[in-house]
Image: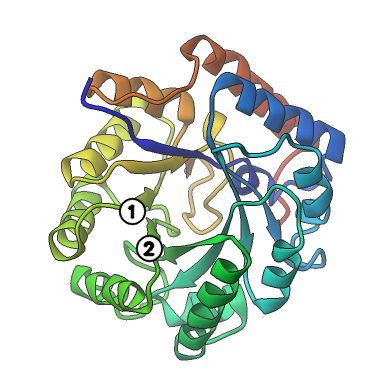
């Protein structure tokens, strides 16, 4: 084996758009199943306004229902200082993630703040998070292009990540928020980032149609570019309302982990649990239904 990778399971990303509220106890039960199976990095909730994301209104209660992290990483998304303040008082949290779009249009839509206004916020959040014992993860959204005609290039992504590094942000994941980047573009962007900044603590949050060949090709592109941090969700649930293709979702964990194994990388998740957990994730999708329009 060539060693391990960081694999982040993202139930928060899977659940956040569901039309019906998943009871807190059911969320906690599923998350505990993930932990028991060996998942050690979870993107599991967000501290955002319940008006905008009602599914995450129980963030504090979900975290309180989990066992102590004890070396695992429990991450919640925050979009502003108010969310960070909630995160700092929550039990069991280890990391906060801030979505920072390279696309001006999407940054305004997603956080109601311009890119220029977001830079000092990131610096402040980094300082506050670390002082409170949390790690800040920045997700560079629309990192592989955008549907708005906003300027984009691999070089712009390299510069953006470089500025984050200068601020002191250690963990940075580039997200295909638009959901249309093929393996060639994924490799092009990530290889450029690895060459400029090194591959340590750089990740990829991608979306795909669920065909095994398409998923494997994107996993290969990430690994071939030198990165060892990937993210996805069981059943490929959730993740991409912008793609214009209802079959595009998160990378399906039950396809990603076997491919990582074929490439010689280990993830501490029991293989025999994948089918059962994927079926459970799919039952949650059907039980709490459809994405909000």
Q: Look at the picture and state if 250 lies above or below 166.
A: above
Identify the residue shown where x is 36% and y is 78%: 149
| x and y percentages locating residue 163 in the rendered image | 31, 79
Question: For the residue labelled by badge 2, is the local secondary structure a helix, a strand or a loop?
Answer: loop
Circles 1, 2 touching at the beta carbon (< 8 Å): yes
Which residue in the rendered view is the most extreme toward the top? 272
- According to the picture, the residue beneath numbered tag 2 turns out to be 170
Q: How is the image coloured?
A: rainbow
Which of the two residues, 212 or 202, is positioned nearer the viewer here?
A: 202
In the rendered view, does 13 fall on the left or right side of 62? left
In the rendered view, does 26 fall on the left or right side of 161? right
- According to the picture, the residue beneath numbered tag 1 turns out to be 201
Q: Quadrant of the C terminus?
A: bottom right
Callout 2 crowding tier (Cα within 10 Å): few <14, some 14–19, many ≥20:
some
Q: Earlier in the sequence, mark 1 or mark 2?
A: 2
In the rendered view, does 212 fall on the left or right side of 177? left
Identify the residue shown where x is 50% and y is 78%: 122
Q: Look at the picture and state if 237 lies above or below 125.
A: above
């Amino acid at each position: 084996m060539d060693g391990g990778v960081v694999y982040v399971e993202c139930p928060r990303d899977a659940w956040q758009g569901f039309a019906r509220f998943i009871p807190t106890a059911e969320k906690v039960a599923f998350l505990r199943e993930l932990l028991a199976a060996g998942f050690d990095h979870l993107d599991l909730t967000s501290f955002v306004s319940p008006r905008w994301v009602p599914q995450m209104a129980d963030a504090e209660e979900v975290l309180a229902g989990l066992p102590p992290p004890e070396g695992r990483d429990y991450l919640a998304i925050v979009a502003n200082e108010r969310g960070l303040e909630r995160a700092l008082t929550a039990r069991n949290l280890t990391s906060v993630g801030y979505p920072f779009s390279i696309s001006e249009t999407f940054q305004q839509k997603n956080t109601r703040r311009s890119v220029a206004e977001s830079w000092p916020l990131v610096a402040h959040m980094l300082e506050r998070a670390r002082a409170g014992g949390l790690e800040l993860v920045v997700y560079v959204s629309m990192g592989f292009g955008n549907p708005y005609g906003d300027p984009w290039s691999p070089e712009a992504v390299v510069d953006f990540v470089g500025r984050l590094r200068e601020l002191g942000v250690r963990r940075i994941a580039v997200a295909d928020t638009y959901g249309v980047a093929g393996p060639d573009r994924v490799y092009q962007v990530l290889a450029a980032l690895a060459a400029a900044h090194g591959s340590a603590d750089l990740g990829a949050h991608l979306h795909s149609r669920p065909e095994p060949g398409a998923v494997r090709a994107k996993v290969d592109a990430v690994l071939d570019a030198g990165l060892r941090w990937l993210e996805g969700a069981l059943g490929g649930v959730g993740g991409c309302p912008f793609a214009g293709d209802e079959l595009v979702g998160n990378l399906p964990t039950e396809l990603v982990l076997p491919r990582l194994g074929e490439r010689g990388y280990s993830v501490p998740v029991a293989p025999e649990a994948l089918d059962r957990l994927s079926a459970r994730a799919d039952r949650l999708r059907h039980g709490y239904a459809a994405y909000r329009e």
